[in-house]
Image: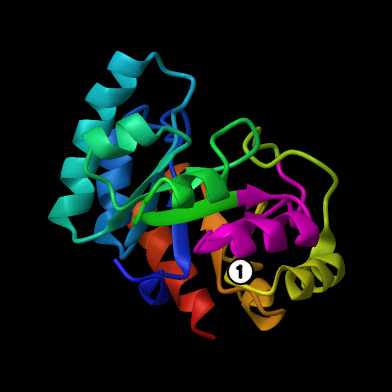
Amino acid sequence: MESSALDPLYLITDRNAPPSGDFLSALEAALSGGVRFVQFREKDLPYAERLRLGREVASLTSKYGACLLVNGDIELTEALEADGVHLGKGTVSVSALRAGGYKGLIGYSAHSGEEAARAISEGADFVTLSPVFPTNSKFSSGPVLGLDKFERELAIANGRVYALGGVGTENASSCIERGAHGVGLIGAILAADDPAHAAREVRAALTV
């Protein structure tokens, strides 16, 4: 998949987010609502369990024609025949992966413009920059940037940047207006009572 086709709505999985407790049903609802770019996270699971769940996720994303990235695990990315991998601190570096001949999509989790720019220069197709807004998510910790600082850091990054952390229907359009390529979300969709409706609402906010 070409990086130019990166969808602006990037859903990051959290199997514990759905209030129903049925993660796969919530994910399918989100996909039916228009999500076409998914990062399979769940990195706290043992490999065998993550592989099993990942196969179900991959089946759903394939069914809806969605792009699938796996968080931080090249072996699992290849096992699931995913479209790419999402890296961060503590994983293999972007440069090492590209030097090894990896041709898939690479995302990277950054917390500053400098970190984002470095990942992009090494071959990342996009970065998430977080947290933009206050969030309870353990996936986007650190000092809150706010929109003004996000915009400044985004300019330093000089590439495709997804706003992450506390992003939802009410502020997604503001991130796009400040120059973000897209938004990364977890709970705003997966924790919603109606993930399909939530996905449609975020999609609409991104096109304002």
Residue 33: percent from the left, percent from the top?
A: 30, 62
* Above or below for 148 versus 137: below
Residue at point 31%, 65% (across, down): 34
Q: Which residue is mark 1?
A: 172
* Direction bottom: furthest residue: 208
- At which x and y percent is residue 6? 41, 69
Quarter of the image that includes the C terminus: bottom right
Judging from the image, what secondary structure is the residue with disc 1 in?
helix
Label 1: few (<14), some (14–19) or many (≥20) C-alpha neighbours in 10 Å: many
Q: In the visual, does 109 lie left or right of 157? A: left
Q: Nearer the viewer, residue 123 or 35?
A: 123
Q: Camera-side residue: 154 or 12? A: 154
At 53% from the left and 59% from the top, the residue drawn is 124
In the image, what residue occupies the spot 74% across and 57% down? Answer: 132
> Residue 137: horizontal and vertical position, in percent?
65, 37
Residue 112 covered by magenta stretch: yes
> Quick one: 200 or 139, which is closer to the camera?
139
- Horizontal side of residue 206 vs 88, given as left or right: left
The magenta stretch is 109-135
Mark 1 is on which residue type?
Ala
> Vertically, is 56 above or below 69?
above
User: Left of 31 or right of it: where is 63?
Assistant: left
Tell me where residue 84 appears, x and y as whole percent.
36, 50
Q: Residue at x 73, y 50 (%)?
A: 131
Whether residue 194 is visible, yes or no, is no
Quadrant of the rendering where the N terminus is positioned? bottom left
Inspect this view and state whether residue 94 appears. Answer: yes
